[in-house]
Image (tube, rainbow, N blue to C red):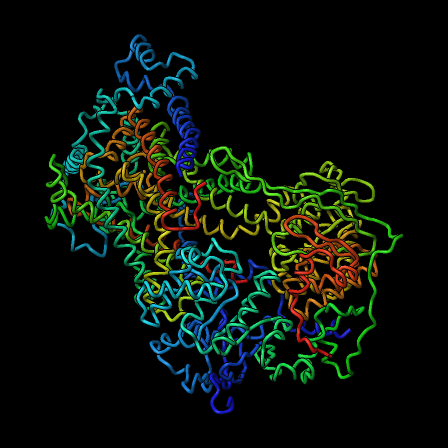
Amino acid sequence: MTKQTTLLAADAACPASRSLWQLGWQRLRRDRLGLAALWVVAAFVLLALAGWLGLAGSHWRDEVAKPNTPPALFKHYAPATVELTAADIDAAQQHHTSAADASAATGMSAEDDPLAADMAAAQATAAQSAAASPAVATHADSLVCGSDSRGRDVLQKVIQGTATSLLVGLSGALLAMLIGTLLGALSGYFGRRVDDLLMWFYSVFTSVPDMLLLLAFSAVMSRGIDTVIMVMALTSWTGTYRLMRAEFMKHKGREYVQAADAIGASHRSRMFRHILPNVTHLLLVQFSILTVALIKYEAILSFLGFGVGVTQTSWGAMLAEAPAELLQGYWWQMAAVTLFMSLLVTAFSMLTDSLRDALDPKVK
Amino acid sequence: MTQATPLLSVRDLRVNFRLENGEHFQALKGISFDIAANCTVALVGESGSGKSVTAMAIMRLLPDHHTAIAPGSDILFEGRNLLAADRRSLRALRGREIAMIFQDPMSSLNPVFTVGDQIIETLMLHTGMRRKAARQRAIALLQEVGLPEPGRKVDAYPHQLSGGQQQRVMIAMAIACEPKLLIADEPTTALDVTIQQQILQLLAQLQKKHGMAVLFITHDLGLVGEFADEVIVMRHGEIREHGPLQQVFSQPQDAYTKALLNCRPRLDSRPARLAVIDDFLQDRPYQVPPQRTRGYAPGDDIVLDVQGLCKSFESREGLFGKHVFHAVKDVSFQLARGKTLGIVGESGSGKTTVGLTLMRLHQASAGRALFNGQDILAMSPREFHACKRRIQIIFQNPYASLNPRFTVEEILLEPMALHGIGHDHAERKQLAAALLERVGLPRRALQKYPHEFSGGQRQRIAIARCLTMKPNVLICDESVSALDVSVQAQVLNLLQDLQDECGLSYLFISHDLSVVKHISDQVMVMQQGQVVEQANADTLYANPQHPYTRQLLSAIPQGWPHQEG
Amino acid sequence: MFAYILRRLWQMVPTLFGVMLLLFILFHWVGGDPSYILAGKSFSAETLANIRHQLGLDQSLPAQFLIFARQVLTLDFGISWSTQQPVAEILASRIGPSLTLALPMLLVSLLLSVIIAAIVAYVRGSLTDRIVTLICTLAMSVSALVYIIAGQYWLAHKLGWFPILGWSDSLATNLWRYIPLPLLLGLVVSLAPDIRFYRSCFIEEMGHDYVRTARAKGLSERAIMLKHVMRNALIPVVTSLMMSLPYLFLGALLLERFFGIPGMGNEVLNAVDRSDFPVIKAITIYVALATMLFNLLADIVYKLIDPRVQLK
């Protein structure tokens, strides 16, 4: 009886019960930096959402100002050589790429370029919209982030770029996690033959470096956001697979899973009802790491011209215009992209660190 | 002579931990004690008593960033205040004047250096020896601590040694510079009972030979009697009792000490109910309950009949080679209804594998297990599913055996839903609540998560989970080994009550011979996968036949020999 | 040991087969009919058929796979579609420039990042540690592209400290004139993530029980760090080093592109640009082989660092 009463007393003294998730959220809320990072990431996602829905940045194709208008704040620091014709810029660009290609023995002539048709179509639509809109007449002479070589608003472009890059990063990461988690769970849980087969699959994909695999995939596939997402998912599931395989192996031997086996829980129930919730926090951390990595990859791919289609823009596509612009002193497009991208990536990395601390099951 | 200046003097030591939510936790609430030179002091306490914190505070090894030693605390070593010492003089002291050995020798040794290197390092640091001389000294030290082939083992890496040998290396390292004080923090907890005895004897012998003072920290009062001069009993960061060995054991003053002495099962008596701490904290004096007799009777109904059980594991080796490890070899036994069969053995004896194989958590290599006449090992998984609820298991680690993301309600309702027990959710919940109360937990516990309970409470939840399926056989795999002695007594009492009430049969697997003696009707001793002896509990303990059984029994710490004598 | 190496080499066979299968699926199935690309604008039914026959595309898929398998086994990938040179010849001339840039970069980066990480881990929790960590986080957030674009513009174009781009035939000139800027920019990109990673390796090791033992022995924090922790932390460091070795052969793609270094990376980009499938396939197979060999090497190196590792 006394035992009962002491237990009841102890029970009354302890506060309302909280699940591990709630405890993690509590810890995250105490971490001011982490919370701030969470807000920044949320703001970016909202911005991207607005971009997808056409609420913001939808007019990025319109020529709203004179070419290469400096940002409003830096109006007076504009470089002296603003009055360059489009032909000059083209020439500069040409010079640059051909120089970079110095080693290539022969280049393909323009007609052979499989992208030429695409390009032409894009230019045609651009020209059409430019001709159709009367905006040409109402050139704005000050824009917050300035304008690019074709007079398009850099701010609109960068918002659209945010939407594209985040879409690629988030959905690519999500898809990769899905593949990696499923295969990793099967591999780690069942072991033996299943594991042998999936490990072979894994070793094939990891024996080719990511970047090379990405390039090989994009060499045979058509350009476009959907392709980029798919290529990214197919090449980056391996990290998640490895993590989940190890975790499922570890948890399979844990006593709570053995106990579930002992009471007669099925394989599926043990894998997804018992083990999965216990590794989800790792997946969350992995997801944010992967998103950052894919956003960076996307930038490089688009920069190299293997990323999103020519009718779309992204941070990488914008950076691709930067070298030529920079040569003439037009730094603002690059600055805008860098600012947006580093803000998002910093916030994401800080969020990752905070998540790791907050959800660490060692602090039980 | 000891009254003049003690070697170590701890005065009003208060240590606070800063918790991650910003709150403070008082780990030590102002403790004071002395250790005289050439004297062994045992510091005894259950988990959370602050015994290890005391040791770390003396060594000044507590991490600075979340612990604070309150002003006014003093730790005087030969008159010098360690709390005021600078880092350089502390370093000169550690390893030379005060040395320490830890609980887990495997992780305490650096895995990438040879054991010789690690001893030589200490010698060169404190004695200024040259490497060659230090190496010779290291070999001599390893010889002294009884490591076989010291000349060869000096170049071994820690993972190449057994647990007992690793602890011997740790001891050699600690005594290398002839320290005046040796702090041993649970040095035998991770070791088997026979190895534990050897290490204890070694420590006692070295203490005498070198004239060191020893601070011996343990949770097991039984170990202390072997060689301590003085005993300090701690609980919740306070000293409950401090006195010479004989006094503490024969005339304990403190209720908690009395309880600790009584709640551990003993070899020479088997009370119907073990004493728990609450029995002593009440006003009325503790009355020893009547003895209980145990043993199989000829007419017992056999629930589980295991014949020739084998289990081997295969691992790949070499280009095409295979290595086969026989974990369990030809094990046969019978479990009677309402009785307990105890399986004892050291690590690697295969006792746990027997339990897991019977649960079909491992696939048996050979043998039969007849449960009510049906061979459960030969059943198809579908047929076995119906049998599963009849045989259940309780694991060792109460922290790992409950899914941390489930509430207690989910944990208890899952097996009922799987086996169609109870008609609907409401009825199941009713059942679960009733079972919780039966195992001594309040009904409100249903809404809580496992991490909100203590180890003993979690083990109660695990028991309740098994009970939801109304099993006939319960396999207890080291189920009370991870618990503090006082909590262990409570859980053992609960298991006994449940057996009497529901006629459960237990397969009780443990390394602890006293606990097995207390709860078992029949006992089976296992060594390296084989059964070496099997008999009624009283017979086996009174008259062991096999040399290994005799060796095990003689290694049990006897407490204080003249106890209640 | 010898049996172990043999077994590991034997295990590479299925992996290599898998890589071949992957490439085959990509280039022969997903990629569609490459004869249109080859024939260019002026294709007629006749030329198409001709090209198909030459490439073996008129044969069944299994037969095509056999042709590809023979190419891999003889390491003869035929001739490049765009330059008509033998693929092996092209690659042989590209490996040198790639190594000239990547090898010094790897060594300098490893040395610097391990040293900085060790120092920062040693003073963990201090202001220095927090500042370095913050700088690393910020530095990692900027795309590699930005560093390279801005670096080339400021340091080469604007300030003229380095040549903008170029390559010569003499190793000394290359090392002296053309390597420093890409090397510097490569370091800027790689240092921050490396320092962060190695720092976490060191800090994780410092939480282990053997560190407590070393303190109890009376060792100074510096000795603990340099001897006990360093040796253990080397294990993950070597892992990441070995993982990055295959990139030596792939070269630093972006840097080679920007600075006109005629290395492997540049070649890959050109090949992808021009759909030069034989070159892509050849490079992928070579890099996959290198990766597998380096993985084996890594395991052998582990054995040297960590006595617990058993090769079996």
Query: In percent of the image, x 56 and y 52: which residue is there?
Result: A278
Q: Position of residue B46 (x, y in %)?
A: 61, 72
User: Can residue C130 be seen here?
Assistant: no
Instruction: Please provide percent x and percent y for residue B456.
Output: 67, 65
Is residue B2 visible in the rendered structure shown here?
yes
User: Looking at this rendering, what residue extends furthest in the top direction?
Assistant: C46
**A44 versus A209 height, above or below:** below
Callout count: 0
Residue C147, compared with residue B202, is above or below; it is above
Q: Looking at the picture, tell me which residue is in the foreground, A130 or A125.
A: A125
Above or below: residue A238 compared with residue C86: below
Quarter of the picture holding the C terminus of chain B: bottom right
| Horizontal side of residue A360 vs B346, given as left or right | left
Q: From the top left corner, tell me how far across and down residue A319 is, in percent.
A: 26, 43
Along the viewing direction, whichever of A308 and B333 lies nearer the viewer: B333
Q: Quadrant of residue C57?
A: top left
Q: Position of residue B258 (x, y in %)?
A: 70, 79
Using residue C94 as the reference point, say whether residue A25 is left or right of it.
Answer: right
Q: Give the answer, above or below, for where A246 lies relative to A222.
A: below
The outermost residue toward the bottom is: B4
